[in-house]
Image (cartoon, rainbow, N blue to C red):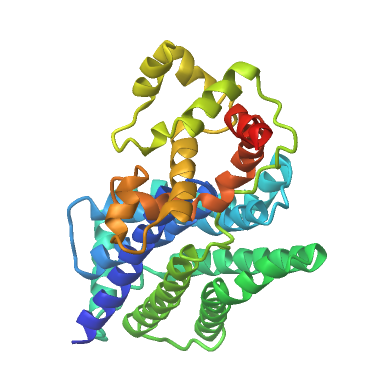
Amino acid sequence: MEKSIINILVIMASVFGFYSSYRLYSIWRTHLFYILWLVLESGFFFCYFLLKNEFQFLNPIILEIFTIIFYLSSGFFYISITLITANRKSIRHYLLALSPLILIGIIKVVIIALYSDQIFYRVHLYNLNVNSSSESITENPFQIEKVLFLCRHIVTAIYLRLIVTMLKRQSNRHFNESWEVIFKPFRISVYFIGFILLAQLIAHTIFNWEMSDYFFINTIMSFSAIMFFWHFSLLLKDLENPNSIFRLPKAASIANPNIPQESLSILQYIYLEQIYKDNNLSIEKVANKMGIPVFNLTQLFGTTIPFSFSSYINYLRLMAYDKESNSKLDKITNLRNVGFNSTAAFYYWESRKEVISIQINPIMIWINNHDTSKNQAHQKA
């Protein structure tokens, strides 16, 4: 029963971590350092699940090599927060910040090199210690790992203090609120586990007090898994928020679109002719309608036009849905009438609406101001 509960906790933390990484990447495809941090933390819990359940296939190699990479994860967390808060630093600053963790990783590499012929035996001892509280297990394979893990937590605690100092200077109320809520579980985990590790090492070194690794390590991993599961649940909830701090950085608004007339004419044609309402629309279809080589049209989007073809088409569909939805029809029908093929596509682009509107809205204003059909109707009136 006890083993089952621990397995559930660590595998839930791992699965939800990987899922959160996927959600964050698939929706916004940004904040790669934060995604990398999520992946490494989730992978660590998965490695512990393998260890706990004595999966022997590649487990010794995976466990030893992965822990080297895992030591860098808190450094990636620090970098990600400085980038999310638009408080960019120089590459030299980041390398300096990562240097203690790189040193810890190097120490781990040296240990592996020195004891390479004992890796399988050491992992066997890990399995025994995390699965049995028997006093007959006299060898302790975790002592060096505890010291390195403590060093990692101390460095991470320093990162957290640097982040707090940075936020006080920046006075970003929105991010400060997110820091207090979303990242609270991570901060609790770092300080609590760091304190417990330090206390255990002091008790062992000075007072010669032994504590079973079975209780000590399983307790730490269970507590850490609960904290990270809490963090992931807060993250997933925040991803549904249109004001999420994990949205793409807002691009500068285009007050006066500096786009060649040829490109503006293409955007105007797509909008005024409402060809975006075609459910099977593609850039090839638009090119054929306008008599333009597909390659040329593809090149314009992302170069002279500062957004993608799909962003423009789906933003027009969102605008049309807001204006033309018929309350007598169901949602699916209304979505299909403006060009969407599914509710999933609609929700995806709706989550990006605020970001892409910053670049597209000024162009829409220009198009409406240069709509000759409207101007002619106004003159006749």
| Front one among 230 and 130 | 230
**Percent position of residue 306, x then y:** 60, 30
* Residue 253 seen: yes
343 up-or-down from 202: above or below: above
Residue pushed farthest front? Answer: 381
* In the image, residue 167 above or below residue 78: below
Q: Position of residue 315 (x, y in %)?
A: 49, 43
Q: Position of residue 205 (x, y in %)?
A: 53, 80
Nearer to me, 170 or 373 = 373
**Residue at 50% over, 18% down:** 299
User: Left or right of 254: which side holds 11?
Assistant: left
Residue 44 image-quadrant placement: bottom left
Q: Residue at x 61, y 38 (%)?
A: 364
Which quadrant: the C terminus?
top right
Q: Residue sitting at 51 percent across and 66 percent down?
A: 241
- Left/right of residue 31 with respect to residue 216 in the rendered view: right
Q: How many marks?
A: 0
Q: Position of residue 73 (x, y in %)?
A: 51, 56
Q: Of 274 and 377, which appears nearest the observer?
A: 377
Residue 178, image quadrant: bottom right
Nearest to the observer: residue 319 or residue 194: 319
Residue 125 appears in the rendering: no
Residue 201 horizontal side relative to residue 126, left or right: right
User: Which residue: 47% across, 67% down?
Assistant: 235
Q: Quadrant of the N terminus?
A: bottom left
